[in-house]
Amino acid sequence: MNTLTDNWIMLKVKDGDLDRMGLLFARYNRQLYGFLFHMTYKREAAEDMVQMVFYKMLKYRHTFTGEGEFIHWMYSIARNTIIDEAKKNKKHSQHDVVDDHADRIPGGIDTADQIDKKEQKIELHRQ
């Protein structure tokens, strides 16, 4: 049995074994970069956001329960990072990119995320 599943690794990170985050970075940094670049079409912004996503995974590691798939949790953080960057930059075009491509997140978005997305979209359009 392979114990090095993404969930197992992230649970170890959650428990304080921060060095294991390097395994997840090695597995997902290129895939995550591709996703972020596809959403923004900005190379440097995508590179920065990859770093930010991994930073947020460390910062919010206590929220990972291991009940769902790690990759869904990671992409949820990535999506929220794009939204945060769009708010920070106040560029309408990035808002549209998030709305147009949110359905391309691997594994889909669960109902709670859909509600969250709608609330964030309303908030983004108010600004």
Image (spheres, grey):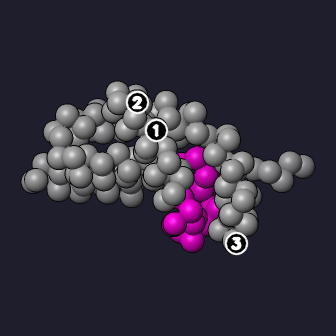
Residue at left offset 32%, top offset 57%:
116
In the rendering, which numbered label is found on residue 10? none
In the rendered view, does 35 fall on the left or right side of 87?
A: right
Which residue is at a point 39% across and 58% down the rendered structure image? 112
Which class describes the residues within 10 Å of circle 1: few (<14), some (14-19), or many (20+)? Answer: some
What is the spatial separation of the Cα atoms under label 1 and label 3, in whole angstroms?
27 Å
SS label for mark 1 = helix
Q: Residue furthest front?
A: 44
| Residue 111 lies in the magenta-colored region | no
Dot 1 amino acid type: Glu
Callout 2–callout 1 Cβ contact below 8 Å? yes
Residues marked 1 and 3 touching at CB (< 8 Å): no
Question: Is disc 3 placed on a helix, strand or loop?
Answer: loop
Tell me which amino acid carries mark 3: Asp
Residue 65 part of the magenta segment: yes
Q: Earlier in the sequence, mark 3 or mark 2?
A: 3
Q: Which residues are magenta?
A: 57-72
Distance from label 2 to label 1 (Cα)? 6 Å
Q: Is residue 104 visible?
A: no
User: Of marks 1 and 3, which one's residue comes earlier in the chain?
Assistant: 3
Badge 2 element: helix
Identify which residue, 99 or 80, lies in the foreground. 80
Residue 43, label in figure = 2
**Tag 3 residue:** 15
Q: Is residue 28 left or right of residue 102?
A: right
**Residue 37 in which image quadrant:** top left
The residue to which callout 1 is attached is 47
Q: Which of pointers 1 and 3 indicates the residue nearer the eye?
A: 1
Cα–Cα gap, marks 3 and 2: 33 Å
Amino acid type shown at disc 2: Arg
- State which mark lies toward you, 3 or 2: 2
